């Protein structure tokens, strides 16, 4: 599967410290429910790289596999060798983003302020990660889309089943969900929980989309 752009309402499942023995089982369960975007965090670099290698080897053609929590050029070099399809950073760093842009790969940088958003736009970046979304809040999302109406926002940090609809209505385009969808250090014992959570999140997104069409 070649890289395709995210579409409105897409959920990116964030995998942190998952048991690498079962990462492919977890990814398959997500796909079975309709979540085709997986971001493997490098907060634990060695585990993350091992998980990425397993996912790329098995699911490269059927899953959008990306990497998150990328904070250095050295990490960029490592993940590019594995064949990831997109890179997500936790924050804005001009030098790092410039380096990533040298590669033919999608980059979604984390931003926290209007100034960082302006920088991202000047780098011809159309999608940013607002992080942590629960700290910045709904009012920030609504306000920031005033001066930047075409900006695509992926809300990450604190997105739950209780508030995802509110962030959708506020104007967020995509959502990165970690522990609420795939528990940290998840193993095969968590598959039932992951399946149920994925179904519930996707149902909420469908309800939002239906309400959009009804207006």
Image (cartoon, rainbow, N blue to C red):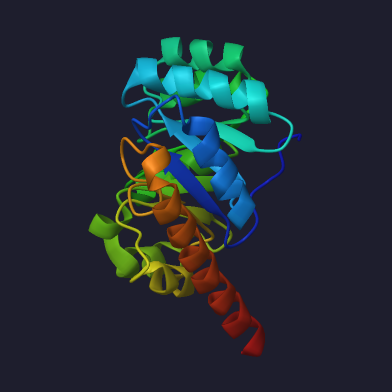
Give percent across and percent down for residue 113. 33, 49
Side of 1 relative to 11 (left or right)? right
| Left or right of 184, for residue 49 | right
Give above or below for 157 relative to 9.
above
Task: Look at the image and tell me in which quarter the N terminus lies.
Answer: top right
- The number of numbered discs placed on residues in the rendered structure image is 0
Q: Foreground: 143 or 70?
A: 70
Looking at the picture, how far across and down is residue 194, in whole percent? 44, 52
Residue name at image x 58 percent, y 56 percent? 10
Residue 182 visible (yes or no): yes
* Up/down of 55 relative to 204, above or below: above
Q: 87 or 118: nearer the eye?
A: 87
Between 182 and 70, the residue placed more toward the observer is 182
Residue at x 59%, y 73% (from the top left corner): 206
Furthest residue in direction front, as rendered: 189
At horizontal 32% and vertical 51% (from top left) the residue drawn is: 157
Residue 27 falls in which quadrant of the image? top right
């Amino acid at each position: 599967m070649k890289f395709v752009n995210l579409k409105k309402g897409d959920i990116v499942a964030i995998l942190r410290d998952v048991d690498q023995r079962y990462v492919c089982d977890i990814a398959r369960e997500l796909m079975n429910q309709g979540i085709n975007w997986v971001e493997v965090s490098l907060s634990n670099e060695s585990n993350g790289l091992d998980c990425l290698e397993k996912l790329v080897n098995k699911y490269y053609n059927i899953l959008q596999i990306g990497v998150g929590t990328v904070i250095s050029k050295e990490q960029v070099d490592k993940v590019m060798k594995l064949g990831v399809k997109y890179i997500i950073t936790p924050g804005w760093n001009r030098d790092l983003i410039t380096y990533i842009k040298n590669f033919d790969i999608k980059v979604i940088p984390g931003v926290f302020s209007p100034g960082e958003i302006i920088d991202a736009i000047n780098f011809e970046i159309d999608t940013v990660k607002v992080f942590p979304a629960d700290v910045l809040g709904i009012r920030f999302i609504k306000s920031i889309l005033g001066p930047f109406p075409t900006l695509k926002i992926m809300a990450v940090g604190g997105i739950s089943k209780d508030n995802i609809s509110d962030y959708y209505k506020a104007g967020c385009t995509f959502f990165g969900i970690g522990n609420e969808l795939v528990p940290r250090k998840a193993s095969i014992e968590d598959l039932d929980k992951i399946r149920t959570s994925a179904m519930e999140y996707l149902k909420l997104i469908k309800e939002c989309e239906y309400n959009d069409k009804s207006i």
